[in-house]
Image (cartoon, grey):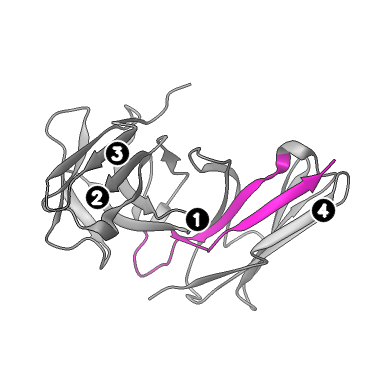
Amino acid sequence: GENVEQHPSTLSVQEGDSAVIKCTYSDSASNYFPWYKQELGKRPQLIIDIRSNVGEKKDQRIAVTLNKTAKHFSLHITETQPEDSAVYFCADAPMDSSYKLIFGSGTRLLVRP
Amino acid sequence: EPEVTQTPSHQVTQMGQEVILRCVPISNHLYFYWYRQILGQKVEFLVSFYNNEISEKSEIFDDQFSVERPDGSNFTLKIRSTKLEDSAMYFCASSISGGGNTGELFFGEGSRLTVL
């Protein structure tokens, strides 16, 4: 079945620096790649997503890039702020079954003031 | 802003007991899901539901699990005979689109199940 690998598992950055989280997927036909942010004890919330017909998407300080050839996608957060501290999950929707999302193992981001 | 609501927020049960977790998806959404998250681990897919039937289920979703949409608003997950390893946070989610056009999943706040 589909597998999504996510790195790093933890990431600590100084406030104002950039953070990059990377994911690789195995199903070359996957067509939807969302990123969710989960604060402690809260629900996962979508922060940005990208479809397979697009290479990059930006929303203010957040951007996602997709490399279909290499089957990986990345989340970029610029000018990090303490409130960006959370667990970030990547996911994809495998084409063999698009009724589900397969999540990565998560990255705990800590932004130091 | 409409949101997915779940009850209870926390349930403690004895091993072997039946548990029902309840969810009210966003009203105009057509696809409904249950995911679970064991403490400190990733979110895992359990089951998706569309047009009053299961669209897909994972290997976790064995015969002990069932889902139901008993009326026009509720979506329930039943675990018939709970095991210790069922202890987890269970998230309900819904989306407007699915199938070949999967879109944003909106998650509820979760129901924490503790099996003793």
In space, the residues marked 2 and 1 are separated at their CA atoms by: 19 Å
Q: Amino acid at mark 4?
A: Val
* Magenta segment boundaries in residue numbering: A84-113
Quick one: label 2 or label 3, which is nearer the N terminus?
3
Q: Which residue is mark 3?
A: B30
Q: Which residue is mark 2?
A: B116
Towards the viewer: B27 or A13 = A13
Residue B5, by quadrant, is top left
Q: Amino acid at mark 2?
A: Leu
**Residue A111 on the magenta segment:** yes
In space, the residues marked 1 and 3 are separated at their CA atoms by: 30 Å
Q: Mark 2 and 3 residues: CB-CB less than 8 Å, in contact?
A: no
**Residue A12 on the magenta segment:** no
Q: Mark 1 and 4 residues: CB-CB less than 8 Å, in contact?
A: no
Q: Mark 2 and 1 residues: CB-CB less than 8 Å, in contact?
A: no
Quick one: label 1 or label 3, which is nearer the N terminus?
3
Q: Mark 1 and 3 residues: CB-CB less than 8 Å, in contact?
A: no
Quick one: label 2 or label 1, which is nearer the N terminus?
1
